[in-house]
Amino acid sequence: MKLFLVGINGKMGKMIASVVENTEGVSIAGGLDLMGGGAYPVFAEAKDVNVEFDCIIDFSRPSTLDAVIELAETKNVPVVIATTGYSVEQLKKIDALSQKVAVFRSANMSLGVNVVESVLPTLASALKGFDIELIEAHHNQKADAPSGTAKQMLTALEKGLEESPDYVYGREGDCKRKPSEIGVHAVRGGTIIGEHTVIFAGDDEIIEIKHTALSRKIFAVGSVKAAGFLIGKSAGMYDMSDYLGR
Ligand SMILES: NC(=O)c1ccc[n+]([C@@H]2O[C@H](COP(=O)([O-])OP(=O)(O)OC[C@H]3O[C@@H](n4cnc5c(N)ncnc54)[C@H](O)[C@@H]3O)[C@@H](O)[C@H]2O)c1
């Protein structure tokens, strides 16, 4: 399997390269990035890409989306989209792309977070009357907030709730909590790779579900597995629940 990495010289691109070096049967044909250099051919624009590959993996910025779409369409290959922070219009473009090629999109490629997401609807439904809060923490270079993973977790929680919650992003001043609220809090600092805690606070008892990423390797391994899963699939939108067979 030959991969093309969008964002090849970023933190995740470099981590995928190191994972692939130790994975039999997988290689990197090149990548797209604003920053050149490294062991593989790096292109600044989609139209210049002159290498062949079986799947694109994108860990970059929402601003590369048009280039990713151009590449996937012209090369007719599937694409794993791991970048976060897309606008509603961009998400529609990704949906449109999935009519033409297979697209795998997940804001979190780790097994652990996806298993947590699978139990959140059950907990939200069973713990009726509990106040729910979500705290996420990331490094000081992260561009978007709340994290894409936090948004995925909120979507999972909503599945277990009878009514749509009111989201409150941080609190300040006169802001007594309403029962319908879910508070969402983004911490940014240092080199934190990624922490997500969902708190269910009831009368005299608290349940916390916490996932901590100790290394970017979990996202890199997950994205390479997603690429393997996607090759040969028909056009459509896929995510971790398809991969995990849920
Ligand atoms: N889905 C997941 O599991 C997961 C895990 C970690 C990070 N992410 C997301 O992946 C993305 C990248 O994360 P990172 O930590 O590697 O970031 P990073 O800033 O280290 O790397 C991004 C790379 O993209 C390149 N880039 C930016 N704009 C570009 C453009 N217009 N054209 C070409 N290249 C461009 C940059 O030069 C850089 O090398 C972020 O959106 C992050 O939230 C997702």
Image: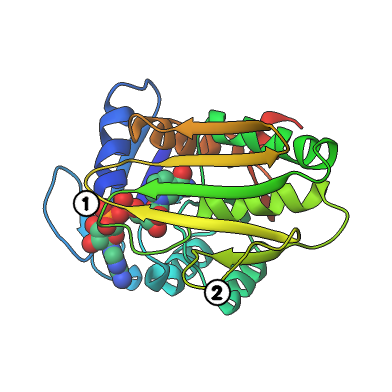
Pointer 2 local density, CA inside 10 Å: few below 14, some 14–19, many at least 20: some
**Residue 105 versus residue 168: which sits nearer the camera?**
168
| Tag 1–tag 2 contact (CB < 8 Å) | no
Q: Earlier in the sequence, mark 1 or mark 2?
A: 1
SS category of the residue bearing label 1: loop
Q: Residue at x 76, y 32 (%)?
A: 246
**Residue 88 versus residue 128: which sits nearer the camera?**
128
Pointer 1 local density, CA inside 10 Å: few below 14, some 14–19, many at least 20: many
Q: Residue furthest left?
A: 37
Q: Residue at x 85, y 60 (%)?
A: 163
Give the image location of residue 150, x and y in percent.
54, 51
Let me know if residue 85 appears in the view.
yes
Give the image location of residue 200, x and y in percent.
67, 40
Q: Residue furthest bottom?
A: 89
Let me know if residue 32 appears in the view.
no
Residue 217 relative to residue 11: left or right = right
Q: Which residue is mark 1?
A: 9
Tell me: is circle 2 under 8 Å from ligand 1: no
Give the image location of residue 242, x and y in percent.
71, 38
Q: How many numbered callouts?
A: 2
SS category of the residue bearing label 2: helix
Residue 211 relative to residue 44: left or right = right
